[in-house]
Image (cartoon, rainbow, N blue to C red):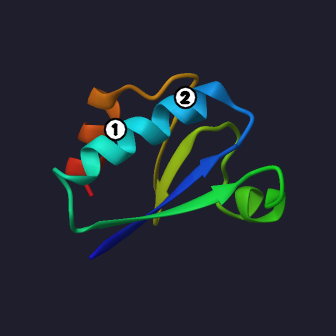
Amino acid sequence: MKSITFYHSIICPRCALARRELKKLKEEFPDVEINAVEVLTNRGKMKDDGVKQFPALVHADKSLSGFILTRAAIRSYLADL
């Protein structure tokens, strides 16, 4: 099983969209475990993983972040893990 970290904020509408797409894609990628990290309370972890903006997905040295994470971008990221 592969594990990714999803950096998000509860007050971020873009993060809510990314979370919704991740939930939908979870059915296509059942072997991926998603660990959610709230950035407002975990700034240190965010910094340690080199995350500069959110929403962001991180797995080892591979990350995906952007203003809006589309379903296609997230699918491609998960497929390349």
Q: Quadrant of the N terminus?
A: bottom left
How many residues crowd mark 2 within 10 Å: few (<14), some (14–19), many (20+)? some
Residue 24 found in image quarter? top left
Q: Residue at x 59, y 38 (%)?
A: 55
Locate residue 73, reporting x and y percent: 33, 31
Q: Is residue 32 left or right of residue 64?
A: left
Q: Is residue 63 left or right of residue 2?
A: right
Q: Quadrant of the C terminus?
A: bottom left
Callout 1: SS: helix
Figure label count: 2
The reply to whether residue 52 is in sight is yes
Callout 2: SS: loop
How many residues crowd mark 1 within 10 Å: few (<14), some (14–19), many (20+)? some
Pick the front one: 70 or 62: 70
Q: Residue at x 35, y 47 (%)?
A: 23
Locate residue 33, reporting x and y percent: 37, 68
Locate residue 59, reporting x and y percent: 44, 61
Q: On the image, numbered disc 2 is attached to which residue?
A: 66
Residue 3 found in image quarter? bottom left
Q: Residue at x 20, y 52 (%)?
A: 27
Locate residue 15, reporting x and y percent: 58, 35
Q: Earlier in the sequence, mark 1 or mark 2?
A: 2
Per the rendering, the mark at residue 74 is 1
Q: Residue at x 83, y 58 (%)?
A: 41
